Amino acid sequence: MSKSPIDKALTPEKFENLKIKTPPTNSAGFRGLKAALSHANKYMKIKDALKVSLKINQKGGFDCPGCAWPDPDDDRSFLGEYCENGLKAMAEEMQNKLIARDFFAQHSVDELASLSDFEIGKSGRLVEPMFLPEGATHYQPISWDEAFSKVGTNLNALDHPDEAVFYTSGRTTNEAAFLYQLFVREFGTSNLPDCSNMCHEASGSALSETLGIGKGSVTLDDLYKAELVMVVGQNPGTNHPRMLSALEKTKKNGGKIIAINPLPEAGLMKFTQPQNPIKMLTGGIQLSDVFVPITINGDVAFFKALLLKLLEKEENTGNVFDKPFIEEYTNGLEDFISDLKTYDFDECLQASGVSKESFDEVFDLILSKNKIIICWAMGLTQHENAVDNIRELVNLLLLKGSIGKVGAGTCPVRGHSNVQGDRTVGIWESAPQAFLNKIEAKYGFKPSTKHGYSVIESIKAMYEKKAKVFFGLGGNFISAVPDTVYSAQALANCNLTVHVSTKLNRSHLVTGKEALILPCLGRAEKDYQKTGVQTQSVENSMGVVSSTKGILEPCSDSLMSEVAVVCGIANATLNERSKINWLAYKDNYNLVRDDIAEVVEGFENYNSRINLPSGFYLPNGARVRKFKTKTGKANFTINKLPDWKLKEDELIMMTMRSHDQFNTTIYGLDDRYRGIFNERRIIFMNREDMKLRSLEENDVVHLKSEYNGVIREANNFKVVGYDIPKNCCATYFPETNVLVPLDSFAHTAKTPASKSVRVVVEKA
Ligand SMILES: Nc1nc2c(c(=O)[nH]1)N[C@H]1C(S)=C(S)[C@@H](COP(=O)(O)OP(=O)(O)OC[C@H]3O[C@@H](n4cnc5c(=O)[nH]c(N)nc54)[C@H](O)[C@@H]3O)O[C@H]1N2
Ligand SMILES: Nc1nc2c(c(=O)[nH]1)N[C@H]1C(S)=C(S)[C@@H](COP(=O)(O)OP(=O)(O)OC[C@H]3O[C@@H](n4cnc5c(=O)[nH]c(N)nc54)[C@H](O)[C@@H]3O)O[C@H]1N2
Ligand code: SF4
Ligand SMILES: [Mo]
């Protein structure tokens, strides 16, 4: 009997061979360099690795497909503007193993699903379109034309365009993303869920409401000039490694750094610049001046405690708040203050799990500094009260006037290399009316004004058979989304699932009745079209748009670019119905950029500005104190203290990334900075919590989570004693996504609460 969709979706429960070492206190340095080179050496052709390492993130080169951290505007190190994980991302994308029809003929879908995510990823690059017919056990080759027409036929057979869901992951370039959303809107729906829905959506919601723009306000230069940088709920040593070089500059300029995190993440502690051989020998610098081991989801409480003390001090001395700023630029101070006064300092501090000593150190720094930047990532955005986390930190910045001036502001550090750009050019299930009006004016069709499905709503719609076709432009939907068991059934309920991908992943194996895999070019590959090799563009975490152009020969002649795939599908689906000449775009991407320039604010003269060596900044109101909110001012907000209490035997669990993965792509089985080697099925626990449960290191446990009466289970994890606050524990994503309830998400933003999962740990 063949495997059920659920069996195929869950990661296999087998153990490798766990080795635990004392976590290092230093990041990057020699070991980082060695790890990156050995990864490249193992999976790439050496000449390609060399070529790539010289061009990655260089002006006129191509953008690292890793994270969205910006490149310096001025000089870039010729030795290499990349980090260990950037090179690993490249090596993964450009691996020299290829998988074509014989691979799929040899291995059934069931067989592939029994591999680990690490093994699936290492199968190689996809090189030709593949089709899984209804009831078939194996994928078989299909021509591009047939594939396009299959998608078109399925889409056109739907009763309504809203029965299709079009997902995007954040690697897609501006050009491909713009055309994709244009096609989806002309087809007739706004169902454009994207990875952002699971990522920084809460930041977008909170920042739009309070500051009038869903993006951060600072530039790299601000970071260098800040007096105080708070890094909250973020692990830059692993996930944004070159941020550490920027923080090193902040320190050199006299700035202070506070890390607020349940874990003492190595990168936030000590850092050795890998591009500087002398520093490698001297052992690097201490980055954080204060480390605050906060309890998971203790951030609103901690910020409230800070705000209460700031208020008290202001009332005593009158020189804490930036009154001229508050007066001129903000709204809602009085209501905010009267609500704040209803909270008790001791209660807040206790709920945050932070000691009075740590609190005082943080408070003194905040009090004495006026140029403050707050950086954050998933540690703040993946909770039910995620939007409150971010609104509360904005309250603090507003009181201090730390926004819209040099060295101060908001810094949500984005994930995928172009996730911010995708949203800017229209990947948005609830796009603003002004944007839709511009589409209508330019193209002459009326886009749907109904809000489309976000990720969570898409899953529900597929489960309930209200959506019947799933299309993914990049990403690995089944492994990225919460509630794996429910979500697997949702995908299985579809008539057709389609993935445009560079590499094999689990989402290709948890399919609708029929499925297609459409292989596409990676970032580093030359994109040959009729008018020559095409340039594309991306926007980084600080709103800089720059060009990216591949430098390696494509690994197969049968690959298409994402732009060409979108054009092919739009043409096959809409055909004569369309008001747009879809096939023209793919011959010359300048035409796409001309359209973006007309439709999206801030892209004037796109085609010429894209040639500027460091790209160009998009307009950013918050950066210049022009707050485009409903009130026309920066808004203080009122946020409730989250009221979550654990049951006696429960722990609160965060699901996070190891040092050896990019989201669902598993580069390897080590998490070097946390002292973990050769295993992913582990649970980090406080040693007292272990003792209470009579657990020893290496014991095997099962995890159960109860939410609204439903019990979810994930079995077989090894216990690791760790420096994590009591009542907290941590596991890796995606192994424990099965425990994240679909109904547990951030209010307003609907980001799954994958850092706030209640679990009970039971000895196997
Ligand atoms: N190498 C590599 N780079 C990546 C990625 C990758 O997987 N690998 N992913 C990319 C993507 S898409 C994203 S979104 C980013 C993710 O970047 P991060 O947000 O840094 O990634 P996570 O591993 O989810 O780590 C969350 C951090 O928040 C802390 N944390 C968890 N819960 C809380 C809390 O309640 N409060 C506080 N204060 N801290 C908490 C955790 O201890 C951890 O240090 O990285 C991007 N870059
Ligand atoms: N429990 C838990 N769940 C989480 C998170 C968490 O912290 N905890 N984090 C969430 C976050 S922040 C995010 S962003 C999502 C990530 O969700 P996704 O974006 O869906 O997942 P990725 O793992 O980044 O996608 C990897 C796949 O993209 C394809 N790919 C890679 N490069 C390209 C390319 O250039 N073009 C195309 N077309 N395809 C490409 C490859 O086939 C690869 O397998 O996961 C979310 N899920
Ligand atoms: S910091 Fe991010 S963008 Fe920069 S090289 Fe590393 S992975 Fe790539
Ligand atoms: Mo993300």
Image (cartoon, rainbow, N blue to C red):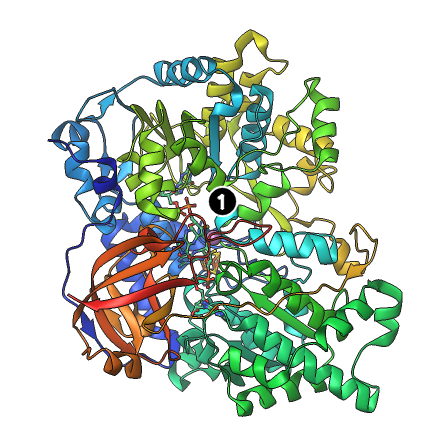
- Tell me where residue 626 appears, x and y as whole percent: 82, 56
- In front of the other: 702 or 552: 702
Q: Quadrant of residue 519?
A: top left
- Tell me where residue 84 appears, x and y as whole percent: 38, 63
Task: Pick the quarter of the image with the N terminus.
Answer: top left
Q: Quadrant of residue 341?
A: bottom right
Callout 1: SS? loop
State whether residue 296 is above or below residue 287.
above
Q: Viewed as shown, does residue 602 lie left or right of 748?
A: right
Q: Viewed as shown, does residue 266 lie left or right of 597?
A: left
State whether residue 586 is above or below residue 655.
above
| Residue 71 visible to an observer of this rendering | no
Q: Viewed as shown, does residue 144 lie left or right of 63?
A: left
- In front of the other: 741 or 238: 741
| Residue 143 visible to an observer of this rendering | yes
- Tell me where residue 517 appears, x and y as whole percent: 32, 29
The kind of residue on which mark 1 rests is Gly
State whether residue 52 is above or below residue 361.
above
Q: How many marks?
A: 1
Q: Residue furthest front?
A: 709
Q: Residue furthest top?
A: 576
Which residue is at 63% across, 84% downward? 345
- In front of the other: 263 or 34: 263
Residue for badge 1: 170
Which residue is at 33% across, 55% downward? 739
Which residue is at 64% across, 32% downward? 593
Q: Quadrant of residue 501?
A: top left
Q: Is label 1 within 8 A of ligand 2 (CB to nearest ligand atom)?
A: yes
Task: Pick the quarter of the image with the C terminus.
Answer: bottom left
